Image (tube, rainbow, N blue to C red):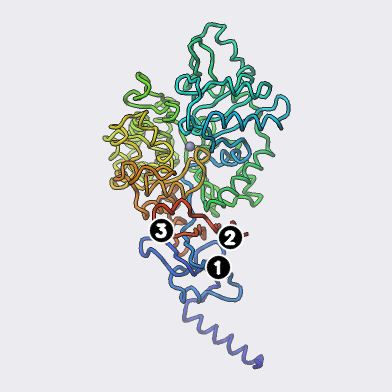
Amino acid sequence: MKFSPLYFTITFLLLLTSSCSETPKETATMLVYGGTIYTVDSTSTTVQAVAIKNNKILYAGNLSGAEQYKTEETKVLDLKGKTMTPGFIEGHGHFMGLGYNELNLDLMNTSSYQDIIDAVAERVKTAKPGEWIVGRGWHQSKWDSMPSEVVHGFQTHHLLSEVSPDNPVFLKHASGHAGFANSKAMEIAGLTNLALDGIKKFEVEGGEVLVDALGRPIGIFNERAQTLITQHIPERTPESDKKAFELAIKACHKNGITSFHDAGIPKETIDLYDEMKSNGKMDVRIYAMLTGWDKDLLIDWYKKGIMVDDDHLFTIRSIKLNCDGALGSRGAWLLEPYTDRPGHFGHETLPMEFVKETAVSGLKNGFQVCSHAIGDRANREILDRYEFAFESLPNATKDHRFRIEHAQHLHPEDIPRFAELNVIPAMQAVHMSSDRPWAIDRLGEKRIKEGAYMWQSLLQSGVPIVNGTDVPVEPINPIASFYASVSRKTLKGTPEGGYEPDQKMTRAQALKSYTLDAAYGAFEEDIKGSITVGKLADFTIFDNDIMTIPEDEILTTKVVMTIFNGEVVYNSEK
Ligand SMILES: [Zn+2]
């Protein structure tokens, strides 16, 4: 068949007229179909197909509806039975920590002190003389057995110092709240003469150097005492920063993460992100919190105001405060003493007066405040300061969306206060899997049952939960945290039925905590978090249907593809 020019003209005119009466059909850049697609929106739970135009969702519904937007230019993606959800949002992590974790010695999978020694000994072989060996991720409570010499529940540095006599070593605890140094590192820090000076024990403001019976440091530095060592570790370089940034982006894509709430960054990191964004490398949406340690930084931003860009790649509108330590290192601030360390309550890591000031300034200047609190005392003190700020500025926005990061252990009386005050708990479910087996030693049975990891009680009270992993404290894998959310089991699948099973999330709640509710925690529920027309085209594709498979198959589920800003950025088959 041959078309005359006249035919084309008429067809063109017809198209023109019809387009005047009907809405003009747009062309999709990508059409996805052929699997189960969970929308996480209020109207329908699944759709057959999604049409995307550039970086936005053009259509979500049945296949024939989506095909109306299909032309020769449309890329077609057949899910072949796989499952697609809105792009997963890491609701609390440390982006550069993730990147550097990929660069540094990873001790996350060590299961004994000997494993750590072996890993360091291996690294010593290739290290230059005097070069620092830095690592992260060890946790004595995950060890199969404890070494013979233990002080205050921790290993001592002697074996570590033996395998690395000339290279200073500093190994961060998985929680980030303690660090472990060898004698070379302590020598550089000028700490070796402590015993000779007759100092039995000394404290750094907001931290502690653990010592043996003779007053000699055992190598463990708690909380801010870590800076005694870390200040001697050579600075990061611009090159290593860029490398770490790129590794972090890669790790996100591999794990289906398209957005990342970065829990506390300093000025240098803001500059780095700006640079990476202008170089077109910001392939994850970063919602960054300003680090509250730097008061000048906060004052600067109060003057400048919040930063919300049109492409939603890099947002700054919140402040992170670190208010106590972690349960593992007994730094979490408790109302009653630790069950396994009588007389010890943990401690606040910044003055509560500063939380009050920041809450007030945050409200006045339109910044969200996100405070790290693990122990029930820290949580209560922060809720009190937030409440003070809300009451003293009754005309400031009600939509402040102040958050408490972790909110792991709450006094039962404080649980309803989150909903009452409109404070969002950002809780990393996988912490329960890792910590619950030994957290009961720290808190005892009553406190664990009444107040630890209270997901369902909080949800029932009417607040959303923002989920996540606190990477690099835990691996960034959202499937592990999803599994933890719905099973309340360790990642080894114990105990049968899960810990405190009445606090489990449903699968729908867990999915929402990683998508729409996480978006809400960043004021972004109108632009992402569900598969809704007009929202950003960020998606995660899994090989299993995480909403219906048997619980014990969730952990073997894999992310097979990640779509960010309308483009496939990760494909496990390639
Ligand atoms: Zn954190």
Q: Earlier in the sequence, mark 3 or mark 2?
A: 3
Is disc 3's CB within 8 Å of ligand 1?
no
**Residue with the mark numbered 1:** 77
Q: Residue at x 66, y 90 (%)?
A: 5
Label 1 neighbour load within 10 Å: few <14, some 14-19, many 20+: some
In the rendered image, is residue 294 in sight? Answer: no
Q: Earlier in the sequence, mark 3 or mark 1?
A: 1
Whole-Å distance between the Cαs marked 3 and 2?
A: 25 Å
Secondary structure under badge 2? strand
Of tags 3 and 2, which is closer to the observer?
3
**Residue with the mark numbered 3:** 549
Q: Nearer the viewer, residue 534 or 473?
A: 473
The image shows residue 457 at horizontal and vertical percentages of 29, 44
Query: Viewed as shown, does residue 383 lie left or right of 314?
Result: left
Secondary structure under badge 1? strand
Secondary structure under badge 3? loop
The image shows residue 183 at horizontal and vertical percentages of 61, 19
The image shows residue 396 at horizontal and vertical percentages of 37, 41
**Residue 568 tag number:** 2
Q: Residue at x 37, y 49 (%)?
A: 486
Whole-Å distance between the Cαs marked 3 and 1?
A: 23 Å
Label 3 neighbour load within 10 Å: few <14, some 14-19, many 20+: few
